[in-house]
Image: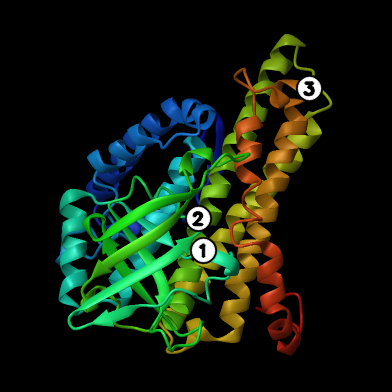
Amino acid sequence: MALEAGALSVTSPLGGTMDTLGPDCVAETLRRRIESATAVAATHAEAVDREARFPGEAIDALRHARLLGVAVPRELGGEGVELAAILDVCYRLGQACASTAMIFAMHQIKVACIARHARGNAWHEELLRRLCGEQLLLASSTTEGQSGGNVRASAAAIERSADRIALERSATVISYGAQADGIVTTARRSADAAPSDQVLVVFLKQDYRLEPLLTWDTLGMRGTCSAGFSLRAAGRPDQILPEPYDGIHQQTMVPVAHLTWSSVWAGVAAAAVARAQLLLRHAARQANGQLPPGAAHFTRGQASLRTLLALIAGALRHYEAAKREEGALASLEFQTMINTAKVEASELAVATVMSALRACGLSGYRNDGEFSVARHLRDVLSSPLMISNDRILSNIASAALMSPLPDSPSAP
């Protein structure tokens, strides 16, 4: 299946797997819903970026298209679509509005964690039914205090009293926290637990209070409204996911985050390359077919975009295969692969947009005009920083030293 990025036809990260949804009419219906929401996101993208505001129109469109619960299993009220289809939505939304795409991606990461790791828990299963029925939007709170982006260490602990739990944490970033219907947060299991002994817990809007700590005035991804808050929450013990967070982190949080985020960045890159293509076609018409010097940068950008999409498709295939093998997701090989894929995808996305910028020249550098890629560049520059590539490479460095090198170019 091919997706249209403006005038540029590129391959989806899915590699055509949307067809696994079932009958053609089902896939076509989903496509129309995606296209409808994407069109709304594109219409308001410039204003969202300029005003650094939440993309309310686009999120309402996603709700109207009933896309927020699309990955929830059918028996819990969803449509049970595969992760491949979620990547497709991230990619398409990324071409339209990076902030909307990232919000959708982060929401789907939380849905995936709950759907996989809370089965049999009545509270969470009812939450998923409500999410599908009411199209609830879930935010994430994993960045905290001095630990920054180290999501495998929590300072704040769950406090228990009788049949209640409470949590107070200083969350330096909660993307769209003020606009979400619920927050999924990490925490230490108890006051005497180690920072790495964590749980994942869901609080709905009536369960918590947010007090602003930090504002969100950034270079790009401005519409994610990722401000900092003091989070004070209370609820029931069964709002804690029954599985320890370390398993959730390895099996779902990390791979789904890296795959969805990479698909968002690929969409941003595709939109930039599409603008470069349109400019070059316009220039060629004006010059009787003669291409300007910037055409060489377009060729490079188009090639790096295809490499980026192939990288995502390959990482997705590895994840789907590993899910079927006991212990494979926790293996050194898989964890190194999926983390390295995030690093490479983010670097490729930046390089792709830079090539598009050079192809467009001053027209791309401008903030106005149909060939501007300024917003795309500012948005995609967040990609090496969302869980810092330096942190990822540092964490996997010692593990990589223990891994054998491939025997040949054809080795896995």
Visual colour scheme: rainbow
Labels 1 and 2 touching (C-beta < 8 A)? yes
> Is residue 385 rendered to the left or right of residue 166?
right
Residue neighbourhood size for the residue with mark 3, other residues' Cα within 10 Å, grouped as few (<14), some (14–19), many (≥20): some
Q: From the viewer's side, name the closer residue of 105 and 274.
A: 105
Residue with the most extreme right position? 293
- Residue 17 visible here: no
* Residue beneath disc 1: 143
Q: Amino acid at mark 2?
A: Val
- Residue 173 - label: 2
| Residue 214, placed above or below residue 251 | above
Q: Amino acid at mark 1?
A: Thr
> Is residue 325 rendered to the left or right of residue 273?
left
Residue 95 on image: x %, y %: 51, 38
Which badge, 3 or 2, is on the more N-terminal residue?
Answer: 2
Residue 401 on image: x %, y %: 76, 85
**Marks 3/1: CA distance?**
48 Å
